[in-house]
Amino acid sequence: MKFKIIFTLIILLILAINSYSVNSNFQINQNAEKGIEGIWQGTLKISGIELRILFKIKKEEGGTLSAKMDSPDQSAKDIPVSEVVFENDSLRIEVKVAMGKYLGSFNKEKNTITGNWYQSGMTLPLELKQVEKEPEMIRPQTPKKPYSYNEEEVEYLNEKAGIKLAGTLTTPKSGAPFPAVILITGSGAQNRDEEIFGHRPFLVLADYLTMQGIAVLRVDDRGVGGSGGSVSKSTTADFAADVRSGINFLKSREKIDSTKIGLIGHSEGGIVAPMVAANSDDVSFIVLMAGSGLTGEEILYLQGALIARANGANEETLAKNRARQEKLYLILKQETDNLKAIQKMKQASLESLDEAEKEKLANQGSKIEVQLKPLTSKWFRFFLTYDPEIVLKKVTCPVLAINGEKDLQVPPKENLTAIEEALKSGGNQNYSIKELPGLNHLFQTAKTGAVKEYAKIEETISPTVLKVIGDWILEIVKN
């Protein structure tokens, strides 16, 4: 989730890019034909989201084939392909680093390849058509170098965890000491720019704030880019410890005003920021961008219903989905043994199906287990039951909480209300709560807020949001 919604396919593809450096020119079939060379593009459809997939196939010296795979809507490029076999108009492509494979049949007359993508128990139709060039992402807000401020690659240590963290620090060219902010990403394996669907929202935000006179530190998540550790083996509380290390790093910098260090958290980052602020006198303000005021379980129910409804589900389907979720989450809360939890969730899942659905899944028991396994991760177990209200009541520094009116992942009214009630109950009198019209979870200007729109919208982040955040911070730090 970011509160990216966690789709196994998305996570595996991104982890493949971030975790491996592999030469993709492997030995392949000797009888390659010229007709299969080139760029082949298709679209996977997953729960209303459309993801473009590209296979770039070429012939090497000696006639062998090699390939690389792109997922442009996930900003994943040149994923190593471990095997390409093209024989008798049948194509097999294996991508071991993503634990996926493609099997297709080549139609010479139509110049198309029809087949399926297989990954983590999923079978997804994927028709490929040959294109002349790779698609271009139009992202007009992405800053271009040279910048009008200083940019520095930095590294520091979370000493308790023994993890190196890597990021980028941008500072104005004059006016030191500067107020500073740390940007905290949403869930999943995120790089320092919080890159998704070709958008780089944290780069855009850092650029804007730095030009307003605010230093900005943005950091790769654990196990991503230059940072050590592992996202999949960590919890939200672990990420809070990483942010505390970032604060210590900023305090050591001569040009940073150590009395004016704030946090900006997006989505899950909006859970992390209050965790840190509630236990540190070094945090002078926090900004929650689509942060949560409800438990993870409550968020998942609301999110699931909104997204399913946006994809055309009727009320009967919504009710069935909710009932299934409740059963699975109850098992997770009661059964601490992961293997036993998976088996119990598998049984509960099968019992909730009608006869036609059961017959369809009759021989797919292991696939169901693969899809259920992420629910037993340390991160998900923590997220499911964590209640932000407890920590929000302890936050005494100024708080800006904003949500997009069309956010389907962290519904604005329920969460902003919960955040405000918690802050008020805790005695915090310096907070601002804003629901911003027409914006989605990524704070893009959107028509419906549906996840499938994210990649199609050229705007990375609404200029209104940039101004709201920048103006509020400058007001807070002016004294």
Image (spheres, grey):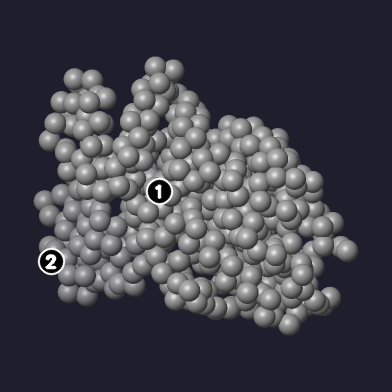
What residue is pinned by disc 1?
A: 380
The residue lying furthest to the right in this view is 479
282 or 59, which is in the foreground?
A: 282
User: Does residue 262 appear in this view?
Assistant: yes
User: Does residue 107 appear in this view?
Assistant: no
68 or 455, which is in the foreground?
A: 455
What residue is pinned by disc 2?
A: 30
Q: Percent position (x, y) of residue 232?
A: 38, 58
Tell me if 41 is positioned left or right of 294 in this view: left
User: Is 31 above or below relative to 138?
Assistant: below
Q: Percent position (x, y) of residue 271?
A: 57, 50
Tell me if 241 is positioned left or right of 22 in this view: right
Disc 1 marks a residue whose amino acid type is Phe
193 or 325, which is in the foreground?
A: 325
Q: Which of marks 1 and 2 is nearer the N terminus?
A: 2
Disc 2 marks a residue whose amino acid type is Gln
Q: Mark 1 and mark 2: span between their CA atoms?
A: 45 Å
Tell me if 430 is positioned left or right of 129 in this view: right
Say which quarter of the image contains residue 329.
top left
User: Is 208 above or below relative to 410?
Assistant: below
Q: Percent position (x, y) of residue 164?
A: 48, 76
Q: Determine the secondary structure under disc 2.
A: loop
Q: Percent position (x, y) of residue 372?
A: 28, 43
Identify the residue at horizontal 73%, vertical 49% (top origin). Answer: 400
Say which quarter of the image contains residue 86.
bottom left
Identify the residue at horizontal 64%, vertical 32% (top origin). Answer: 413
Instruction: Estimate how packed mark 1 is, as few (under 14), some (14 to 19) or many (20 or more) residues with alpha carbons within 10 Å.
Output: some
210 or 370, which is in the foreground?
A: 370
Identify the residue at horizontal 34%, vertical 55% (top origin). Answer: 12
If the image is split into quadrants, where does the C terminus sit?
Answer: bottom right
